[in-house]
Image (cartoon, rainbow, N blue to C red):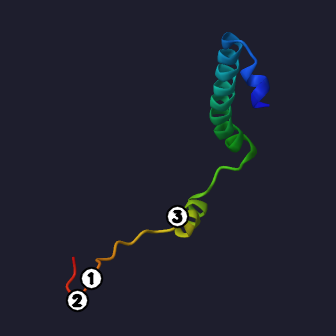
Amino acid sequence: MFKAYKNLSPNARLGVGVAVLAWGAAGLYLSDRAEEKFGFKPTEQDKEELRQMTPHIVAVDREDKDGKSG
């Protein structure tokens, strides 16, 4: 697949790249509207459950060899 892309002229490669970017931007723009239209918009409860599942990072002070921290 990559070989076929490399065989295109520079202008054609530019066109393919712009088309892929436009497709992605349209998908990002339209997906939010589709969620609202079909009733898949997350509730506050859904958002809170997702926040609880997200890993949290806790910083812990490291002790030196002599038992002193930091």
The residue carrying mark 3 is 51
Circle 2 packing at 10 Å, graded few (<14), some (14-19), many (20+), is few
Residue 61 or residue 40, whichever sits in front: 61
Q: Is residue 15 left or right of residue 67?
A: right
Residue 51 or residue 12, whichever sits in front: 12
What type is the residue that disc 2 sits on? Answer: Gly
The answer to whether residue 44 is above or below residue 10 is below
Q: At x 56% / y 60%, what residue is drawn?
A: 47
Q: At x 58% / y 63%, what residue is drawn?
A: 50
Q: Is residue 8 left or right of residue 17?
A: right
Circle 3 packing at 10 Å, graded few (<14), some (14-19), many (20+), is few
Upstream in sequence: badge 3 or badge 2? 3
| Residue 37: quadrant of the picture | top right
The answer to whether residue 47 is above or below residue 61 is above
Query: Are circles 3 and 2 on residues that touch, CB within 8 Å?
Result: no
Query: Are circles 1 and 2 on residues that touch, CB within 8 Å?
Result: yes
Upstream in sequence: badge 1 or badge 3? 3
Q: Is residue 42 left or right of residue 48?
A: right
Circle 1 packing at 10 Å, graded few (<14), some (14-19), many (20+), is few
Q: Residue 30's spot in the image, x, y percent?
A: 67, 33
Residue 3 has which mark?
A: none
What type is the residue that disc 3 sits on? Answer: Arg
Quarter of the image containing the C terminus?
bottom left
Q: CA distance from mark 1 to mark 3?
A: 31 Å
Residue 67 has which mark?
A: 2
Element at label 2: loop
Element at label 3: helix
Q: CA distance from mark 1 to mark 2?
A: 6 Å
Residue 63 has which mark?
A: 1
| Residue 25: quadrant of the picture | top right
What type is the residue that disc 1 sits on? Answer: Glu
